Amino acid sequence: MFKKILKWTGLVLGSLIVLLGLFYLYVSINIGQRIEKKYSFAPEKLEINQDSALLTKGAHLTAIKGCKDCHGADLSGQVMVDDKALGRLVSANLTKGKGGLPANYSTTDWVRALRHGVDANGQALLFMPSHETTLLSAQDMAAIIAYCQNLAPVHKQLPPSDLGPVVKVMTYLDKMPLLAVEKIDHDLPMVMQVDTLEGVAMGKYLAVSCSGCHGANLKGGDPVAPGYPPVANITSTGHVGKWSKAQFIQTLRTGKTPEGKVLKNENMPWKMTAQYTDKELSSIYQYCQSLK
Ligand code: HEC
Ligand code: HEC
C-alpha cells in the first residue's frame, strides 16, 4: 500500500516537473520570438531649437523621469540587475563614446526610441519604458533629446542583457514591462501641448512616471517583482489621502513618511522624486487627492 502511494506520488511529481519544463520551454520560445520581431514605424520629425533653457529643462527631465536611475548619473549605461532569477538587465550607453550610440544616431532615431520603443533597426528595446516616454510632450521630448545629444562622450562597452526565467515568465503573464513596443498605441500622435499651470492636469501628466509601479489608477498592488514590497496606494483612499501637501512633498524628498516608514530608494525611487520642483510635486499631490 505504502509503496503504491510512493509510486503514484513519484509519477505525479515527475509529470508535474515535465509539464513545468515544457511550459518554460514554450515561454522561452514565445519571448524569444517577440524579442526578435522587427518593427517599422514612419519616421517622425521633431523640431529642436536648442538653447540653454532647453538644455536645463532636459537635465531636469532626465533626473525626474528616471533616465539617470537606469542609465546612470552620466547616462553612460549600466548593468541594472544581475542575478539568477531575473538575469542580467543592461541599459544603454546614451553618450557618443565607444560602446555608446553610433555617431549617426539622429533625432529621428531618438524619437523612434522614445515614441515607439524600438532601436534604429526596428528591434524592440528591452526594459526601456517607452510606453511612458511616448506620452511626453513634443517640447519635453525635444529637451531630453537636446540634453542627451550634448552629453560628454563616455567610453563604456556594456555586456548584452541576458533574461532570466522570472523575467520571461512574468513577461509572458504580462506582469513585467519588458517589451514596451507591445504596450504602445503607435497610432497616437505626439502630445503637442500640456498644461504648465500647477494643478490636477499637470499632475496627471507627470504621474505617468509613477504609474509604472503604482498602476494606471495609482492604487498600487502586487510587488513589481518577487522580493519587492507591495506597491502603495497613493490615491486619496491611501495614506496620502490623510497627508497635507507639505507632508507629501516632505515624503518624496526624504523617503520618510508621516507614519514613520522609511522608504528604500531601490523600492520607491525617492531620490528621483526628490528632484521634482515644488510646483510639480504639488500638482502630483492634487492629482493623487482627486483620485478615489
Ligand atoms: C527602467 C529603466 C529605464 C528608464 C527609466 C529609462 N531607460 Fe532608456 N533604456 C533602458 C534599457 C534597459 C535600455 C536598453 C534596451 C535594449 O538594449 O534593448 C534602454 C535604451 C534606451 C535607448 C535606446 C538606445 C538605442 O540603442 O537605440 C534610449 C534612446 C533611451 N533608453 C533613452 C532613455 C531616456 C531619455 C530616458 C528617460 C526619459 C530613459 N531611457 C529611461 C532602461 C531605462
Ligand atoms: C519603481 C517603482 C516606483 C515608482 C516609479 C514610484 N513608486 Fe512610489 N512606491 C513604490 C513602492 C514599492 C512603494 C511602497 C514602498 C514600501 O512599502 O516600502 C511606494 C511608496 C510610495 C509612497 C508612500 C505611500 C505610503 O502610503 O506610505 C508615496 C507617497 C509614493 N510612493 C509616491 C510616488 C510618486 C508620486 C511617484 C511618481 C512621481 C512614485 N511613487 C513612483 C514604488 C514606486
Image (cartoon, helix red, strand yellow):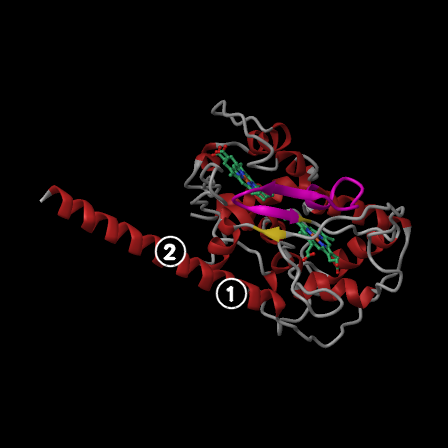
Residue at 64% from the left image edge and 31% from the top image edge: 253
Say which element carries label 2.
Answer: helix
Query: Quarter holding the N terminus?
Result: top left
The quadrant of the rendered image in which ligand 2 is seen is: top right
| Magenta range | 69-89
Query: Mark 2 is on which residue type?
Result: Leu
Instruction: Please state which amino acid type lies under the numbered disc 1.
Output: Ile
Q: Position of residue 155 (x, y in %)?
A: 86, 46
Circle on res. 29: 1
Disc 2 CB within 8 Å of nearest ligand 1 atom: no
Q: Is residue 149 above or below residue 277?
A: below
**Within the magenta stretch, is there residue 72?**
yes
Dot 1 crowding, Cα within 10 Å, few <14, some 14–19, many 20+:
few
Where residue 274 appears, as percent x and y from the top left, is 67, 34
Residue 70 position by quadrant: top right
- Between the C-alphas of marks 2 and 1, the distance is 14 Å
Which of 196 and 184 lies nearest the eye of the viewer?
Answer: 184
